[in-house]
Structure formats: C-alpha cells, structure tokens
Image: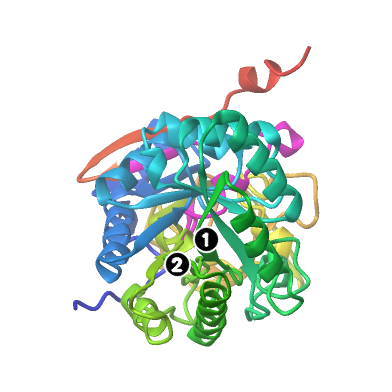
Amino acid sequence: MSVVIESAWPRTAAWIGGQLRIGGIGVRELAAEFGTPAYILDEEEFRARCARWRAALPDGEVHYGGKAFLCPAVVRWLREEGLCLDVCTGGELAVAVTGGMDPARVVFHGNNKSAAELRRAVAWGVGRVVVDSFAEIERLSAIACEAGVRQSVMVRVTPGVEAHTHEFIATGGDDSKFGFSLGAGSAAEAVRRVLASPWLELTGLHSHIGSQITDLAGFTLAARRMAGFLLEAEREHGVSIPTLDLGGGLGIVHRPGDPVPPHPAEVVAALREVVPARLRLAVEPGRSIAGPTAVALYEVGTVKEIPGLTTYVSVDGGMSDNPRPAMYGAAYTAALASRASQAPPREVTVVGKHCESGDVLVRDLPLPADVRPGDLLAIPASGAYQRSMASNYNHVTRPPVVAVRDGAARVIVRRETEEDLLRLYV
C-alpha cells in the first residue's frame, strides 16, 4: 500500500514563483476568470480519495456522505469511481437523480423525512431508507403499501458511544435527535416493528457517532456494540440482517499540527477486527473525501491595524461561505497565494465582510507584514461543509465551485447573482 502524507492542501497544490497553482493553474488566472470568492476544487484529488476508500473496502459499500458537498458533477464522479451515495433531504435526492445515480445505490437518511420525501424516494426506487423514529416506520410502511412495493430499510441505532468531538457534531450518544437508543431498548423495539410490517424489509443496521474524528477507539467500540446487537436481533427473530453500516465521521487535517487521521485501509481493518466476516460492511465518508480537495480563494480588501491589539485582514467573503468558525470554533489556516513576499510575518486575524463581529475566518495567523489590498488568500480544507452550508446572509451571493484538472478549469456550481436573489421575492 502506498503511503499518502495527509495535508490540508490538495495533492496538486504547488507554489511556483510565489503563486499557488492547483490542477496546473495559477490562482491569479483563476481569480481573473472566475472572480472571488470561489471554491477551487481539485478533481484529481477528489477521485483519488474515492479510489482509496473503494480499494480499502472492495467487498463492502462506500456511501459518499452527500451533505459534505454535492452537485450533479460530483454525483457523476461518484458513479465513475464506483461509490454509492447517501442523502438526507429531498433536495439532495433531487441532485442524485439529476446526476444520474443508480437509485439502488442511494441510501436516504434524515430524522424527520416528510411524507412527500418518502413518497419520492419509494417511487424512484431508493436502495434503502434509514428509519429514524417509530412514527417514520409507520409512515414509510403506509407509503410503501400505497405504492405496492416492499421497501428495503435500515434501522438507525445510537450505540451510546460518545465521539470526542464538538457537541454539535456528535451523534452517537443516547441523548440525540437521531435514531433509536441501544441502551434504552428502543432500537430492539424498532427492529421488531420493522419486521412486523409486510411492506418493509430489514436489510441492515446503521450507526454514526459524529464527525471530525481522528481516534479509532470510538469507531471500534461502536462497531463492537452494533455487531453484538445485530447478532442478538438475528437470534431473537430468526432472520438474517446482512449489512452493518457504521457511518462516517473520519476527520481531516485543517492546519499544520492537527492530528493526522488514519488511512481508510486502517479504518476498515479496525472495523473488520470486530465485525463478523459474513456481514456486508458499509461506511459513509464525506468530509474525508471532499474536505481536502478544495481551497477557498479570496481577495484582500482592507488591512486595518489597531496598534497594540490586532491587525484585521478583511476578505471579500466570510461567514456566509464558511460558517464553521462562527458556529463551533472550527480552526483553519490561510496563505498568501498570489505572490512571493520577503516581509517578516506578523499575526493577523482574517475576517469577512459581514456585519457581525463574529465573522472571523482565521485567528492568530502569521502572514507577511506587507499583505495589502488586492492580494489573494487561500484557505485549504474547504471542500466539505462550506458550499453546502453557505448562506445569503446580508444578501451576499454564494461563490462558485470551479473544478480544476490537468491545466483545465470549469464551473460545476455557478456563482449566484443578485438576479437569483431577487427572483425569490414576490
């Protein structure tokens, strides 16, 4: 197995003459053609990360976590790389349809799927629906009956494993809006209710303990508990439950010094040690595929020095295109990307243009002291949970996503315009 050194930057990123180049194209050229802010996505890196997961689990299922970042072009890449897709809303389901994904390779998540979303999923032939509540079991059973089909489902279980991550992205404990508690017995009852419905087919169990995880201990503990519960359910009901889906959540490097996450092959090997070989193993990487593939590219507009306190470097984006620092203190790095500088570094705070004091992208960042308006800054590890969480706060339009590969660039998500915003008003 070849060793890939994890970095916050895409693998084709290189500084040549002081300018950052990605996919063989310099950022000055990209900014001139596509404007800023923009997400620059390395297609080669994205596909390579898909391939690493597929190679790590050739006899199982790799479901890309679409909530990290999804568009029709990405769906096509997933198809070509042999991955499945998980979605959690009707909107994500619509993107899967538009991108031409085989519905049998789609898993539909969500703690509060509407009847309309479930009808659409059943009608399209979604491979599996992950049921998340007793009400949903009844709702889906009735919808499947109306359609005259037997819908394949998985039961989402909270295994009582706390991921060592931020509370907003931890989902495996008993006190969670997701799934059925293993410890409280509701998971066992959910299995019984699914098996009692002639319109539902139980084909697997599912768990997901959180996000941005770099320690395998939580994964393996959850796998052990889930495998044990699956075997107990099979013995109790005399059925076979062929698939165990252990979710995603593997972290990435956002900045130098961050913990280096395990390689996909290490993750799968650790899970296989505790999951019976006869079970089909499924995983759901999202951030670990998309995250390191893109950089957010900004132009500096203002540099404001407050003597004895802080120097603020303001860019033309901010919390509307990356809400994660404001939401839960996510830490990033950034670099001067458009030119070389011999100036000594000084610590600055990179902020956005929004009318919020909390609109901070990077704190305590050493940048050359001569950073000035017109310079380009690049923030790596921007491929996941940025464009997908972007908003129109302050009526700022959302940036484009530009895919680069082998010296060519193309827009895969266009920049929003003011006309797009105004079209919504009546």
On the image, the x and y values in percent for residue 252 come to: 47, 70
Q: In the displayed structure, would residue 182 be above or below residue 206?
A: below
Kindly identify the residue that appears in the image at 48 percent across and 34 percent down: 95
Q: Is residue 398 magenta?
A: yes
**What label sits on residue 240 in the rendered view?**
2
Q: Is residue 153 magenta?
A: no
**What label sits on residue 370 in the rendered view?**
1
**The disc labelled 2 sits on which kind of residue?**
Ser
Q: Is residue 152 visible?
A: yes
The quadrant the C terminus occupies is top right
What span is colored magenta in the figure?
Answer: 376-403
Residue 50 vs residue 151, the one in the foreground: 151
On the image, the x and y values in percent for residue 117 come to: 63, 35
Image depth: mark 1 or mark 2 in front: 2
The quadrant the N terminus occupies is bottom left
Count up the numbered dots.
2
Q: Is residue 338 left or right of residue 344?
A: left
**The disc labelled 1 sits on which kind of residue?**
Asp
Kindly identify the residue that appears in the image at 49 percent across and 67 percent down: 239
Q: Sequence-wise, which precedes: disc 1 or disc 2?
A: 2
